[in-house]
Image (cartoon, helix red, strand yellow):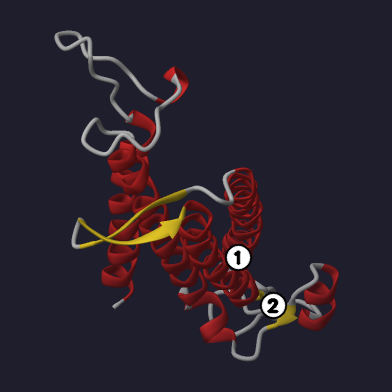
Amino acid sequence: NDQVALDFRLFVREAAEEIKDRVLAAMRALVDLAEEHGDLVLPGYTHLQRAQPVLLSHHLLAHFEALKRDLRRLEAAREAANVSPLGAAALGGTPHPVDPALTAAELGMEPFSNSLDAVSERDFVLDLLYACAVLGMHLSRLGEDWVLWTSSEFGFASLDDAYSSGSSIMPQKKNPDAYELLRGKAGRLIGDLTSLLVTLK
């Protein structure tokens, strides 16, 4: 029991680190794009209506700020997973001569305080799923910008063929598949969080 719980915690700890690395890469890409087009002005929108002119860089860096908050949530999820349950056994400890503080230190983790909680709690998983759900929502919003901006109605940008597809019956269309998938997968992340909350309740 405690070994399975430990494996789950190690998985969440590693997943949080991997996702953080990818979020940092996305943040760097936003900064690069903002620097490349620093003086480009485009219409800012409220309620899908043109409102005030804004710099493209300012708009892109708004997404950067959202991702920066996502990094903090991922760091918190990693920290929540960083407790070793080894020695808790099924729920009330083990008669074997183990040293929970020693094994926790070897793993770079904190030792558990309560054996029952150590093997039964999954809050750390909820923390990661919540961080992923919010990240997915933020990426969906970014994807929506590109869907709109690359449409013929807006025409602010054009898509590379690597990130789009054509239509079999409407050759003039270039569909923003990658960004639509980005938007669609956010729903799965929100669903995963809800499913685990319902399971744990």
Disc assigned to residue 9: 1
What residue type is disc 1 on?
Answer: Arg
Q: Nearer the viewer, mark 2 or mark 1?
A: 1
**Residue 85 is at least partly visible in this image:** no
Residue nearest the viewer, comparing 44 with 184: 44
Disc assigned to residue 87: 2
Residue 129 % position (x, y): 43, 63
Question: How dense is the environment of label 2, judged by Cα within 10 Å: few (below 14), some, or many (20 and up)?
Answer: many
User: Would residue 169 be found to the left or right of residue 57 on screen?
Assistant: left
Residue 184 in the image: above or below residue 112: above
Q: CA distance from mark 2 to mark 1?
A: 15 Å
Residue nearest the viewer, comparing 147 with 79: 147
- Could you say which quadrant of the image residue 179 lies in? top left
Disc assigned to residue 81: none
**Residue at position x 69%, y 77% from top?**
87
- Could you say which quadrant of the image residue 136 lies in? bottom left
**Residue at position x 33%, y 74% from top?**
200
Q: Secondary structure at mark 1?
A: helix
